[in-house]
Image: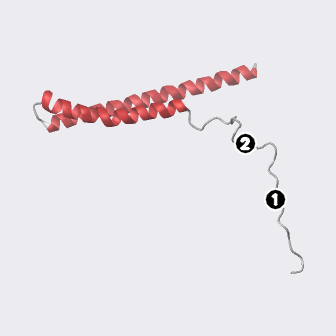
């Protein structure tokens, strides 16, 4: 143990971005996609519940079964709308990527 090793700090690479610099890496999920997802989550919770309570007394005269069925239909409609929007977004992204690739190849 006659030799003692001294710890020498390792210098960080100079090309490492600091917290003050903006990142050039895009987010994994675009902000618009997250916003749409949040809108559909709120709709999936509020619309079926609102439909149930509004139709139970006002439309179906206290019949919880009919109001529940209507709420289930509304929930399915919200899910279908989300699927349609997601597919359209995906297609739009694919077309944009294809246009970018075509422009690079020309």
In the image, farthest residue toward the left: 61
Quarter holding the C terminus?
A: top right
Dividing the picture into quadrants, the one containing residue 37 is top left
* Label 1 environment density (alpha carbons within 10 Å; few <14, some 14–19, many ≥20): few
Question: How far across and down, in percent of the image, does residue 87 sit?
Answer: 48, 29
Question: How far across and down, in percent of the image, does residue 98 sit?
Answer: 64, 24
Q: Which residue is mark 1?
A: 9
Looking at the picture, tell me which residue is in the foreground, 4 or 23: 4
- Compared across the picture, whether 89 is left or right of 43 comes to right
Which label's residue is closer to the chain start, 1 or 2?
A: 1
Quarter holding the N terminus?
A: bottom right
Looking at the picture, tell me which residue is in the foreground, 8 or 90: 8
Q: Residue at x 10, y 31 (%)?
A: 61
Question: How far across and down, in percent of the image, does residue 34 sit?
Answer: 49, 34
The image's mark for residue 18 is 2
- Compared across the picture, whether 99 is left or right of 43 comes to right
Q: Residue at x 27, y 34 (%)?
A: 48
* Label 2 environment density (alpha carbons within 10 Å; few <14, some 14–19, many ≥20): few
């Amino acid at each position: 143990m006659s030799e003692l090793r001294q710890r020498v700090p390792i210098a960080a690479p100079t090309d490492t971005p600091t917290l003050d610099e903006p990142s050039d890496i895009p987010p994994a999920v675009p902000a618009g996609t997250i916003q749409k997802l949040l809108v559909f989550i709120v709709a999936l919770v509020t619309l079926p519940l609102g439909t149930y309570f509004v139709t139970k007394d006002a439309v179906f005269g206290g019949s919880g079964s009919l109001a529940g069925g209507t709420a289930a239909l509304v929930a399915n409609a919200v899910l279908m709308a989300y699927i349609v929007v997601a597919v359209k977004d995906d297609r739009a992204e694919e077309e944009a990527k294809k246009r970018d690739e075509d422009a690079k190849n020309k």
